[in-house]
Image (tube, grey):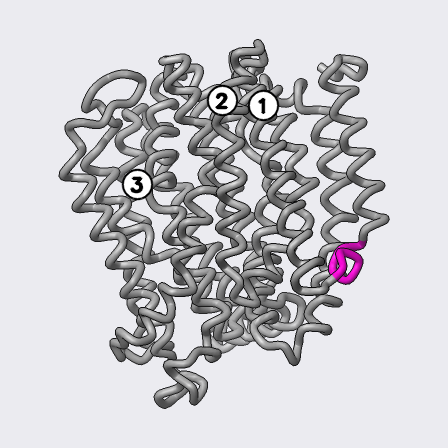
Amino acid sequence: TSNYYICAFFRMMKLKLTKFVDNISGLQIYQLSRFIVFLIISIVFTKTHLSSAEIGKWEMFLFIAGMLSFFWVTGIIQALLPLYHRNRTYRKMGDTGAGKSPEIFNAFLLLTFFSLLTFVLGHSVKGSISVFHLSGNIPFMNLLLLYLLLSSPVCLIEYIYLLNNRSYRIIQYGFYTFSAQLILVIAPILAGKDIIWSVYGLLVITGVRWIWLIVLLKRYTAPEFSWKFMKEHLYLGAPLIITSLISGSAQYIDGVIISTVYRDPAMFAWFRYGAKEFPLVLLLANGLSNAMLPEFATRAKMKDSLVKLKLKSKRLMHLLFPVTMVIMLFTRWLYPRLFAPEFHKSAGVFLVYSLLIIPRLVFPQTIVIGRKKTRITLIAALIEIGLNIPLSLLMIKWGYGIVGVALATFIVYCISKIFLAGYVWVKMKIKPTEYIPLKLFIIYSILTAVVFILVDRGIIDIR
C-alpha cells in the first residue's frame, strides 16, 4: 500500500511538471540550479578556514576547465540542435526504430573525441604552463585533466532530454545531481579538510553523471557511426566552435589579463567573485536562446517562431530588469556580507557585469544560428576579440583597474549584438521589432543605466 501511494505521488508530480514546464523553462531552471549550487559553494568557502589564496586555487581549477572546453562543447551542442531530425544525412527524420537518434550518438562521439584530444594535449604541455607566474604549478593539474576528460560529454544529458521533449526530466536530473554535488564539495571543507577534497567530490559526481549519460544513450540513441553526418555536423559547428572560443572567451581573457598584470591569486579571486553576471539573466537568456534554436530550423515556422521569441523576451524583460536594478542597489552592501570583508573589491566588478543584461536580452544570434548562418556569428566574434583585449589593457592603463576590464567586456558585447541585429535586419529582412519588444527594451535599458550611474558614483550608497 505504501508503495502504491509513493508511486501515485511521483506520477502526480510528473503530470504537474509536464503541464507547467516546457523545454525552455526546463532548461532555464536546470542552468539556474547549476549556478545556485556553485554560488552556495563560493559563499560556504569564504565562511570556512580557507584563505583567499586557497579559494583562488579552486576558482583557477574551474576557470581553466571552462576555458579549455566551453567553446567546443557549446559549438557541438548548438550545431546539433538545428540538425536534429533536419539534416541531409538522415533524411527520414533520423529514426532507426523506437524513435532512437543516430544524430545524438554521433554528437556524443564528437564530444568524446574532443575531450580525449584536450586530455592528451594537456598532458603533453602541462609542465610548461604557468599560472600566477609559477611555472608548471597549475592547481591540481592531473585532476584537472581527468575532470576535463569526464565532464565535457555529460553536458549532452540535458539536451538529450530537451530534444526528446522530456522537460520534467531535465529538472529531475538537475535536482538529484546538483544536490549531490553540493554535499560532496562542501562536506570535506566543513570537516576541516584541504581544498583538494572538494576537487575529489567534484570528480565523483562527474563520474555519476557519466553513468547517467550511458543509460540515456542506450535509451534514446541508435549506435550508428556516420562520418557523413559528423562532417555535416562539423561543417555547421566549426564556425560556432570558433565563435564560442572568441566571443565566449571574454571572461577567460579577462581572467588571463588579471592574473598576468597583477600576479596575485587573491586579486584573481576578487575579480572572479565579481566577474559574474546576475545568474537569472545569463542562465534564463541562454536557456531561451538554446531552446529556441530548433524552432528556427525550418522556414515554415519562422513567423510563429519570431512571435514566440518576442513574447518570451518580453516576459524575461519584465522579470529580469527590475530584479537586476534592485540587486545593483544592494551590491556594495551585499558582497562583504555574503562572502568576506576583503571581497568588497568584487562589488564594483559585479556592478559592471550586471549591465550585460542589456545586450543579453536581445536574441539575433538565435535567429542566425537557427537558420544555420553560423559564419556570421564568427564575424561578430572576431569583432569582439579584436576590441576586447586592447580595450581591457587601455582601461587598466587609464586607472580603472579590474573594473575597467569588466567595462571593456560590456562595451564589446554590445557592439557584437548590434552587428548581429543589423545583419538580421539587412540580409534576412527581419526587423528588430519582429523579435524584440523594442520600446520596452529601451525604457528598461535607460533605467538600468541610470541606476548603475547612481550606485557607481555613490549618489545612492546602501551599505
Tell me whether the residue at label 1 lies in contact with that at label 3, contact meaning CB atoms closer than 8 angstroms: no
Identify which residue, 452 or 198, lies in the foreground.
Answer: 452
Percent coordinates x, y for residue 166 in the rendering: 51, 71
Answer with left or right where residue 429 lies relative to residue 343.
Answer: right
The image quarter in which residue 462 lies: top right
Q: Nearer the viewer, mark 1 or mark 3?
A: 1
Q: Nearer the viewer, residue 290 or 75?
A: 75
Residue under the image location 53 percent in, 29 percent down: 275
Q: Amino acid at mark 3?
A: Gly
**Rendered image quadrant of residue 359:** top right
For residue 197, what is the image quadrant? top left
Task: Give above or below for 350 relative to 279.
Answer: above
Where does the image place residue 242, in percent across and percent down from the top left? 41, 49
Q: Secondary structure at mark 2?
A: helix
Disc 3 designates what residue?
201
Report the span colored magenta: 431-437
Residue that numbered label 1 is attached to: 349
Seen at 66% across and 58% down, the residue is 424
Cα separation between marks 1 and 3: 30 Å
**Mark 2 crowd level (few <14, some 14–19, many ≥20, 10 Å Cα):** many
Residue type at mark 1 is Val
Q: Residues within 10 Å of mark 3 (few under 14, many from 20)?
A: many
Circle 2 residue = 271
Provide the secondary structure element on which disc 3 rests: helix
**Depth order, front residue of 41/107:** 107
Query: Which residue appears at 52% of the width and 15% of the height?
Result: 396
- Relative vertical location of residue 124 with respect to residue 113 in this rendering, above or below: above
Task: Give the residue at x 33% y 25%.
Answer: 57
Sequence-earlier tag: 2 or 1: 2
Q: Amino acid at mark 2?
A: Phe
